[in-house]
Amino acid sequence: MVIQRIQTVYLLIAVILMAVFAFFPALSFELGGREFVYGALETGKVGMTHIDPLMLMLVILISLLAIIDIFLYKNLQRQMTVCFVDIIIGLAMLVAIGIQAYVVGNRDGVTVSCEWYLLLPVLSIIFLMMAHKSMSRDKKMLRDSDRLR
């Protein structure tokens, strides 16, 4: 039986945070009395929203990679690589959201407000980083025990 390590908990928390983030808008814009939202499953004018395929694909990819990463415990190097790629994709998603806010916010008469749900992917990335740190700690422990043999 394999002992589950703390990085499994960190990865599960990251998956849950990204799943919750998918259902809520990250940004809201107000232009001429009309309100618009931007998120994975809600993008567009309030009341007539649609799915943003790029944002939804990134959220699903981050969650899927974290779930796959949980089951790669037998190959620690590959697990660390997948976790690092997951962190990079998460940061790319945050940059895409920032660019969207900047582009829309540069227009005259547009008020941009960040929702508190935007903290969820940031927290998810933090948990992914904590998982990566735990994996590197495990790798160091294995290297030290191999040296003692």
Image: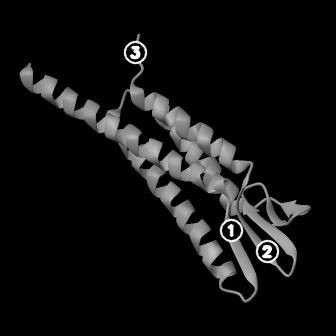
Disc 3 from disc 1: Cα separation: 46 Å
Q: Is residue 30 left or right of residue 75?
A: right
Residue indicated by mark 1: 113
- Dot 3 amino acid type: Val
Residue positioned 17% across, 30% down in the render: 143
Which amino acid type is marked by label 1? Ser
Locate residue 76 relative to residue 44 in the image: left or right. left
For the C terminus, the image quarter is top left
Q: Sequence order check: which comes first, mark 1 or mark 2?
A: 2
Assess disc 2: are there few (<14), some (14-19) or many (≥20) residues with their C-alpha within 10 Å of its C-alpha: some
**Residue that label 3 marks:** 2
| Dot in front, 3 or 2 | 2
Residue at image mark 2: 30
Callout 3 crowding tier (Cα within 10 Å): few <14, some 14–19, many ≥20: few
Identified at 79% across, 58% down, the residue is 42
In depth, the one of 20 and 114 nearer the eye is 114
Which of the 4 image quarters holds residue 140? top left
